[in-house]
């Protein structure tokens, strides 16, 4: 159990059966009065933000969170299915839980899936993924001005801007944190 | 007892000290000016031990113990013993220690200015506070206006005088009685009332419920109210003063209540300060006050956090 004095930014606790992360934390105390711990907490499933004030003596259950290495399998309707690489158990995430990661999900991609108890609630991608370009305008020689970019579409349907020398069928590395092109993959 | 929060990390970056330097220079000038103010007014500067055998029992103040002694949470008890022993006007700049207090306005080790004067009450003391602030602003060539937390504050006397009852009536969503009965006083104070205090002028918030002033005298003819006040500047609590209780019997009962309260909530219980209670029998009528000097420097320097006005914060040493 955590005490109120353990509260700090980033701490993950369980309230009413849901996991919350502390996003803002402020200690205040009238000189002769009680210690007050004013927080903003974000629900890790719904994203809803609450702003409770706790006092010394209040206790909290740590949120039962764990990460598992899983492989992306397929999507059906609005569910995205992953398989645990160790025990082959399969678990789904809803489309809104996958969020922007949808741009990088290709078959067999290994990701970290965040579980609250037995319940999958989030995904962490590798920082860099290699994806195949499925649609690109040909490189017109002569307009290779530095800084020029052109739009391409990747195998996942994600569209981004890349340097003009990238061609259809080639592979590129994308930074999943920024969504930007990093380099061409030499095969 | 943890001494500080864990969500801060610091490196010895020269830039931090570049930023702090002007605040540290101002801090030194403020301390010098405070001494000048009290010495020219006939106060005696005294020093009392930081390691004591029995801190003042307070439900919500955690003392830090070292072997069989405690680091003082305030020099109050020793200073009152001097007051009772023929020192009628005394002041002290004291290092004090309180466990578990760390935030933008809190350090577990901090500096308090305390002064006591025989023969006056809390109203006289309020006037002396006004005089002190005007003296400091003149010595610091700062004019009579302060800019603090985005508001302009007039230092000229008289400051706003607001009773706790009126403050609840004016600003709080629940009544003072409801707050007291439902253990909501502190939270209501912090969240609903304090942001309105010390905005145009400084504010004296005064006449506290008797249950919230363990060492203050009750108002004559009004036993539910203690003659206690706090100074607020820009929503920040700066000082706590009162007419001193000098009835040893009554004081013992109040300490017993505080110690009981601590025992009930599973907190450490320190010994009864017997020597202080003995001395209290001879203490004259007096008023005294504790003023947070780190916060005072914040207010005069425009610093946003207490970290900016000390040489090192606990996480750096």
Image (cartoon, rainbow, N blue to C red):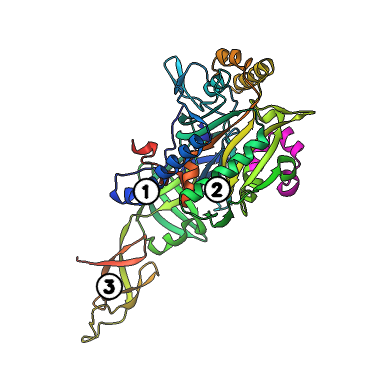
Point out the frontmost of discs 1 and 2.
2
Label 2 sits on residue: B134
Disc 1 secondary structure class: helix
Q: Is residue B176 magenta?
A: yes
The answer to whether one can see residue A52 in this image is: no
In the orientation shown, which residue stands out farthest toward the left?
Answer: A187
Q: Marks 3 and 2, Cα distance to the nearest angstrom?
A: 77 Å
The quadrant of the picture occupied by the C terminus of chain B is top left
Quarter-wise, where is residue B174 in the image?
top right
Query: Magenta stretch: residue B284 in it?
Result: no
The residue carrying mark 3 is: A169
- Disc 1 chain ID: B
| Residue B136 rendering spot, x and y as whole percentages | 50, 46
Is label 1 in contact with label 3 (beta carbons under 8 Å)? no
- Report the magenta residues as a range: B168-189
For the residues carrying marks 3 and 2, which lies nearer the camera in this image? 2
Residue at 50% across, 25% down:
B63
Looking at the rendered structure, whether the residues under marks 3 and 2 are on a common chain is answered as: no
Residue that carries the numbered disc 1 in the rendered image: B20
């Amino acid at each position: 159990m955590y005490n109120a004095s353990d509260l700090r930014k980033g701490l993950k606790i369980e309230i009413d059966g849901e996991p919350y992360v502390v996003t803002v934390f402020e200690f205040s105390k009238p000189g002769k009065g009680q210690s007050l711990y004013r927080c903003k907490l974000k629900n890790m499933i719904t994203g809803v933000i609450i702003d409770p004030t706790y006092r010394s003596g209040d206790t909290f259950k740590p949120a039962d969170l764990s990460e598992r290495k899983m492989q992306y399998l397929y999507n059906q309707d609005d569910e995205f299915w992953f398989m645990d690489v160790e025990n082959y158990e399969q678990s789904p995430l809803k489309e809104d839980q996958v969020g922007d990661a949808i741009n990088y999900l290709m078959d067999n991609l290994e990701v970290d899936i965040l579980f609250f108890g037995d319940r999958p609630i989030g995904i962490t991608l590798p920082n860099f993924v290699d994806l195949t370009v499925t649609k690109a305008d040909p490189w017109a020689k002569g307009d290779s001005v530095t800084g020029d970019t052109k739009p391409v579409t990747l195998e996942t349907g994600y569209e981004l801007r890349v340097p003009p020398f990238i061609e259809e069928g080639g592979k590129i590395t994308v930074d999943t944190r920024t969504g930007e092109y990093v380099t061409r993959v030499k095969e | 007892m943890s001494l500080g929060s864990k969500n801060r990390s610091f490196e010895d970056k020269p830039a931090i000290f570049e930023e702090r330097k002007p605040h540290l220079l101002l801090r030194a000038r403020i301390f010098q000016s405070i001494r000048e103010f009290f010495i020219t007014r006939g106060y005696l500067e005294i020093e009392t031990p930081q390691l004591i055998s029995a801190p003042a029992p307070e439900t919500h103040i955690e003392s830090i113990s070292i072997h069989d002694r405690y680091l003082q949470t305030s020099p109050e008890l020793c200073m009152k013993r001097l007051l009772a022993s023929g020192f009628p006007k005394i002041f002290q700049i004291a290092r004090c220690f309180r466990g578990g207090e760390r935030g933008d306005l809190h350090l577990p080790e901090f500096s308090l200015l305390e002064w006591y004067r025989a023969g006056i009450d809390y109203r006289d003391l309020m006037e002396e506070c006004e005089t002190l602030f005007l003296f400091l602003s003149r010595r610091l060539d700062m004019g009579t206006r302060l800019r603090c937390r985005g508001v302009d504050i007039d230092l000229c006397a008289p400051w706003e005088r607001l009773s706790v009852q009126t403050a609840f009536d004016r600003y709080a969503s629940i009544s003072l009685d409801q707050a007291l009965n439902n253990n909501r006083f502190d939270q209501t104070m912090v969240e609903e009332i304090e942001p309105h205090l010390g905005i145009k002028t400084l504010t004296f918030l005064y006449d506290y419920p008797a249950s919230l002033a363990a060492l203050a005298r009750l108002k004559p003819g009004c036993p539910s109210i203690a003659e206690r006040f706090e100074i607020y500047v820009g929503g920040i609590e700066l000082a706590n003063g009162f007419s001193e209780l000098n009835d040893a019997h009554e004081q013992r009962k109040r300490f017993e209540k505080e110690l009981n309260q601590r025992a009930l909530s599973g907190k450490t219980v320190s010994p009864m300060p017997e020597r202080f209670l003995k001395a209290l029998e001879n203490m004259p009528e007096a008023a005294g006050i504790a003023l947070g000097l780190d916060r005072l420097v914040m207010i005069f320097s425009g610093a946003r956090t207490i970290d900016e006005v000390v040489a090192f914060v606990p996480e750096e040493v």
